[in-house]
Image (cartoon, rainbow, N blue to C red):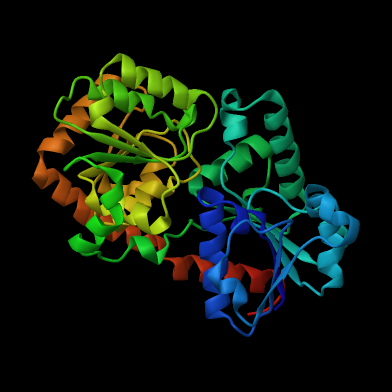
Amino acid sequence: MKIGFDAKRLFNNRSGLGNYSRTLVGQLVRNHPQDPIVLYTPRAGMEVDFTSAPNVRTVFPQGAWRRMGSLWRTSALAGIAAKDGVELYHGLSHELPIGIERTPVRSVVTIHDLIFMRHPEFYSAFDAWMHVRKVRYATRVADAVVAISRQTCKDIVELLGVPEEKIRVVYQSIAPLYTGGLSADRVEEQLSGFDLPKDFVLCVGTIERRKNQGVLLEALRALPEVNLVLVGRRSGRYGQQLDRYIERHGLSSRVRLLSGVSSFQLACLYHRSRFVAYPSIYEGFGLPIVEAMGCGKAVLTSSGGCFSEAGGQGALYVPCRDVRAITEAMDRLWRDGELRTRLCGEGLRQVQRFSDGDTSERMYALYNELLGRK
């Protein structure tokens, strides 16, 4: 089976959609070396280890297309994939190339979330319109649609009118890096340059309004013993608003904002934290919840939506806009070691549902089904 992938984010996005792409494709490369895999990307902003495997080929725009990478990806790839003999093409993040339904190539598209439809206030009008346009086309022409959670599946049916029988729920997997133990010495070695407090709450995610980190700062004002480490790149003006809030309320000594950390350093931060807080307003899945549980940490996260799918019994749930409830839950988790231990145990059991091998094999079975193979 010759499989083609939209690899733009695999090579150019260090978090979120990039992690999803690298984990899934990497596992398929390792588990199915007999199957040729073609990665289509307009550019490669980072090295990815498995792309040197003998069954992997990376394709970039050629000739005049080099100056029009985005147009190449949307308008030319369907024909290129067909000429390359690709049997199945997987759009890993909401998109399929225009015209793929007019080729012999079968297609799958993964939909991570429909936040731009559920919460358009977090997007510019143009960006929301463009996202909707792309996802409507992709879900209409795809032979199968993959949702990364039951919440996303529900949204696809309700907001896009896609028949539920066309959708498969295949949960996002957790990278092995977040499921292994790390020695205290190794953790301290990796984090020695970050000037971290002895104990802290960790929050992971892009610094943006939807991720709702500000509510943790509000809670911190009533919790003088608690320190907070925020990890994520800044997006828009929200980071500046948080900076001003921290300065205005004298929180500078208890809050660290980190960006550009490696995946291994992030795993070390999970291990080093007291617990993990993830107060996001809306997600398609909530991968940091699963990563934290894989590292043996209790999690405080939002009630409703997809969050209980990810967290199961390994998390404490509170309304994401209720500062008082979040403050009380943070205080409880900070002080109650028995509660943290119980949640850690439940979380380690929950995380077994999201192994990368299980996810990749379910996806591989779907590919075979679409091609009429067992």
x then y, percent, for residue 80: 85, 65
Left or right: 199 as drawn, with respect to 171: left
Q: Is 276 drawn above or below residue 209 in the view shown? A: below
The extreme bottom residue here reads 34
- For this rendering, which residue is in front, 257 or 79? 257
Q: Which quadrant would residue 327 be assigned to in this image?
A: top left
Question: Which quadrant is the C terminus positioned in?
Answer: bottom right
Q: Find residue 178 and report its horizontal and vertical position in percent.
A: 35, 60
Give the vertical position of 297 relative to 124 (above or below): below
- Residue, x 16% and y 43% (percent of image)? 198
Any part of residue 132 in sight:
yes
Q: Residue at x 20, y 44 (%)?
A: 274
- What quarter of the picture does the N terminus occupy? bottom right
- Give the camera-side residue of 360 and 327: 327
Residue 307 x, y percent position in the rendering = 39, 41
Q: Is residue 367 toward the left or the right of residue 309 in the image?
A: right
